Image: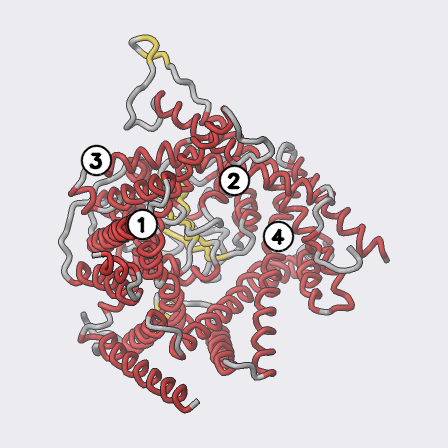
Amino acid sequence: MPGLTTATILGAWVAAGLTLFIYSFLYKDNPLFKLGEHLYVGISVGYSVVLVWHTVFLRLLWEPLRKSVSEAPALLESYILLIPAILGVLMLVRFIPRIAWLSRIAFAFVVGFGSGVAIPRTVSALILKQIEDTVNPLITMGANGLSMGLDLASPQSGVNTIILLIGVVSVLFYFFFSVEHTGPGMVTARTGVYFVMIAFGAAFGYTVMSRMSLLIGRFSDLIKFSGAEYGYATLILLAVTVLTLIGWEALVRQKRQEV
Amino acid sequence: MIFLKRQLPLVITFVMGVAFTLQYYIPHPVSEEAITNVSKWMQIISGFALFLGLASLFHVHAVKIKRQVPGWGYSFALYAGMLGMIAVGFWSHGETRVDGAQTGFGWLYDYTMVPLQGTMFSILAFFIASAAYRAFRARSREASVLLASAVIVMMGRVPLGQFLIPWTWDVTQWLLNVLNSAVRRAILIGVSMGAVALSLKIILGIERSYLGGGRDQ
Amino acid sequence: MKEFARRMVGIDRRLIFLLIAGAVLLPLVKPFGLPIKVSPEVKAVYDYIEALPERSVFLLSFDFDPSSKPELEPQAVALLRHAFRKNLRVMGMTHWLTGTGLADGVFSKVAAEMGKERGKDYVFLGWSPGGGSLIISMGQDLYKAFPSDYSKIPTRGMPVLEGVRNLRDVDYMISLAAGSSGIEMWYVFGKDKYRFEMAGGSTGVIAPGLYPFLRSGQINGLIGGLQGAAEYETLITQKGTVTAGMDAQSAAHFVIISLVLLCNVFYFMLREEKGRPS
């Protein structure tokens, strides 16, 4: 690898070290893990503060407001961004008990808007569109006349549409607890349960795949940082971590014996 | 005063809720202008809301240090990480890269935040394996169905499984596109109906928990 | 035998951790290179991008953070390589605050590799809060939603955004999502009203929940997890590290399946013993 910079090599050592600190939790909860965990929270919060300041306050509020006011100071419209600024500040007064009630105005504004825009969009996108696809025609008119697709491999075939319809209705019925699940209702609910078990099994399989992928990603980085160009960072830091854990374990046992 | 503290927020929620529900169906320029401006305002207000969460975290750890509860030293590490990141971030003007070159802020992001966040979540892979070994048992018919489905999908979604038992790929595709879709669709419809009902309750003032507790509510 | 089963059921979980670590590590060090089969939902995304005319507007939303980097970054890299190869005008953005640096890094890396110029061939708009409100804002007026890009350059007048006023002018959109602020949100607040075509790339955890959208045509394709990224890499005939990672994935899955089957064998052995009358 052509000339890695000092910053990159140092970064590799820091990254490998922090990764191994977190993985030390697999042995047991220990000071290295706790340090890594607290650093993670602190660094994430610090990053968020910087980005929120630069994006929200400077880019979205200060610069457009300054521009509009400098271009047309007499126009009322130039000051329109003061409205969200005031509402935002009202949100923050939640921390001052005597005037905390003012924050309700800001929350009412935000929640009212959010609820209002959500209703028609949710109905259209998540309810009507989903029902529309569930009640597809089973029999279609083709070149050879009326036909019903029986190919299981094709998701849109007639037989799959029937299975889908049975699945959707039985699962919806299973989760409907206002009616007792007896007689034909019990058969429908039991069918729903089996559909749910299959879906959850698939979800488990995908979750395993996902988590293993995350592990593969981290291990790939650790393998990369174990190379000579990075000064065998992973290997040396792994030895340091193991020795630290052994030392810490010995110290804890000694303290326990003294007690 | 009671009106300002109790009734006014409910009136604002009602007016905003009804206005922006109806806005969806009204293509008039005034209506479009309203949603353009208000959605922009929401971006700004959401940014202020983020500070609420950050301030709360700040407060929790400040109390830990002040009271010197066990483990308070780690709160120092949290503050050190946070303040260090903020200082370097402002020094770099909030940019991770300038003309393709990495800044100090970018270095901290790439070599501390990315590995820490990535590793925190990747550790779950070990626990999922351990939990699967201890708890994933075919105790009943339903559990057996769940187990079979999981095994087929785990085989069918990796090259080795597809190579050794080719039909697992086809069955996985069918399972996902038909059976899984049916269940997810039912759950989606149910949850969406619940969300619409909750939104209506909020707009009509029946649901008031978003205003926060207190004697005034 | 029963004693063995009892001991195996109560085995120290750290041994299982070592087994998983070994299963993942060994194929990464020595890959065995199995072929990747491409699913129809991934091919649909590839075909759509392949059919887009040059200089079409392609919006890629990086709705993930470093915790999902191993699954979604390879998808992003493969999609960007394809888009740049097709000379599309690429717009990037993110809904996830902590993913901003990651997204900028991917853009910089792939653009440099493909000889593309910021402002002319692509723009990274960065992060903005709001979620659904942001999408509505972009759908109404892109320049109000993002007055400047991530590098603080004003967006109005940028050559790459010529003729683009809002989301209606986007030809294709893909959301690479790790959670609820992703594909579903883009459809509900975006495509439903502003009528652009869209697809999704997701982590394995949320992928099964997106199949109803795929079936109904609300998204025209879905790239699921690391497997999806490997399939896309196969289609663009540009092998990345993901294809090697799939060997580790295969090994890990087989270890998990073996563990699950073994645990059931031991469970049934012990259950038989409990069922015998004394």
Amino acid type for the residue under numbered disc 2: Val
- Residue B42 is marked as 4
* Residue plotted at (41% across, 67% down): B96
Chain that bears disc 4: B
Query: Residue A209 vs residue C234: left or right?
Result: right
Helix, strand or loop at label 1? It is helix
Mark 3–mark 4 CB contact (< 8 Å): no
Mark 2 vs mark 4, foreground winner is 2
- Image coordinates of residue B55 in percent, x first then y, are 60, 69
* Residue plotted at (15% across, 48% down): C34
Please identify the quadrant where the C terminus of chain B is shown: bottom right
Instruction: Using the numbered discs, state the Cα–Cα distance from disc 1 to disc 2 in whole angstroms.
Output: 50 Å
> Which picture quadrant has residue A7?
bottom left
Q: Nearer the viewer, residue B211 or B163?
A: B163
Chain that bears disc 2: C
Instruction: Using the numbered discs, state the Cα–Cα distance from disc 1 to disc 3 in whole angstroms.
Output: 32 Å
Instruction: Using the numbered discs, state the Cα–Cα distance from disc 2 to disc 4 in whole angstroms.
Output: 17 Å
Mark 3 vs mark 4, foreground winner is 3
Q: Nearer the viewer, residue A30 or C75?
A: A30
* Residue plotted at (19% across, 75% down): A229
Q: Nearer the viewer, residue C172 or C203?
A: C203
- Residue C188 is marked as 2
- Density class for disc 3 (Cα within 10 Å; few <14, some 14-19, many ≥20) is some
Amino acid type for the residue under numbered disc 3: Trp
Mark 4 vs mark 1, foreground winner is 1
Query: Residue A224 vs residue B184: left or right?
Result: left
